[in-house]
Image: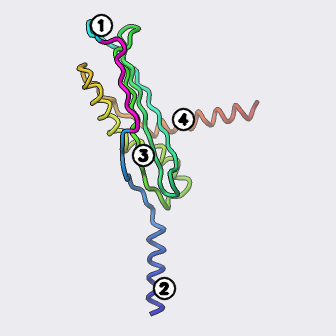
Amino acid sequence: MAENQENQNAGSTEQNASPVFSLQRTYVKDLSLEMPNAPEIFLEQEAPTVSVEINVSAQRLAQTVFESAVTATVTTRIEDKVLYLVEATQAGIFEIDNIPAEQMDPLIGIVCPTMLYPYLRATIADAINRTSLPALHLSEVNFQALYEQRAAEQAGTAATEQVQ
C-alpha cells in the first residue's frame, strides 16, 4: 500500500513537471479611432498613404500567468491631412509553467504575439469598416524577426552604455 502511494506521488510529480502553455483569454485592451478631418476629407480624390507601427509588451500577472499585448497604430493620410488614425491593443492572458528559463523570453516575445495578432487584425479591420472607407487588412508580421531586431537594438544600447 505504501508502495502504491509512493508510485502515485511520483506520478503526480512527473505531471507537475510537464510544460504548460495555454491561452486563457483574449480581449481588446484599448481601441481608438479618430477621423479629425471628416467630412471634408471625403471629398479628396488622391489615394491615401498608410503607415503601420506594431509594438509588443508583456507582464507577469502571477507566478504562472502572463499578459501579452500587441498594439498596432495605423495612420492613413492624404497629403498632410489625417484621413483616419486607428490604434488598438489586443491582449491575452497565458498560463505558462515548467518552461526552461531560456525559452521564456522567446515564448512571450514571439509565440504569444503571433497567437494574438489575428485577433488584432480583425479588430482593426472592423474599426476601419465602420468609417465607411475601403477596408484595410494588415499584412502578416514576422514576430521572430521583430523580436530579434529588438534584441539586437537592446544589445547595442547596452554596449553603448558600457562604453560611456
**Split into 4 quadrants, where in the image is the C terminus?**
top right
Q: CA distance from mark 3 to mark 2?
A: 37 Å
Report x, y in % for residue 60.
52, 50
Nearer the observer, 47 or 159: 47
- Residue 52's image quarter? top left
Q: Give yes or no for contact between labels 2 and 1 (Cβ–Cβ under 8 Å).
A: no
**Residue lying at 47% horizontally and 50% vertically, measured from the top left:** 66
Q: Decide: few, some or many residues near mark 3? Use Cα within 10 Å; few <14, some 14-19, many ≥20.
A: many
Q: Give yes or no for contact between labels 2 and 4 (Cβ–Cβ under 8 Å).
A: no
Three-letter amino acid code at the position of disc 1: Glu
Q: Which residue is mark 3?
A: 112
Q: Is residue 35 magenta?
A: yes
Report x, y in % for residue 96.
46, 56
Q: Which residue is mark 4?
A: 150
**Split into 4 quadrants, where in the image is the N terminus?**
bottom left
Q: CA distance from mark 4 to mark 1?
A: 40 Å
Three-letter amino acid code at the position of disc 4: Arg
The disc, 2 or 1, on the residue closer to the chain's N-terminal end is 2
Callout in the foreground (4, 1): 1
What secondary structure characterizes most of the magenta part?
strand
The disc, 3 or 1, on the residue closer to the chain's N-terminal end is 1
Callout in the foreground (2, 4): 2
Is the residue 156 above or below the residue 61 in the image? above
SS class, disc 4? helix
Span colored in magenta: 29-38
Mark seen at residue 6? 2
Three-letter amino acid code at the position of disc 2: Glu
Q: Give yes or no for contact between labels 4 and 1 (Cβ–Cβ under 8 Å).
A: no
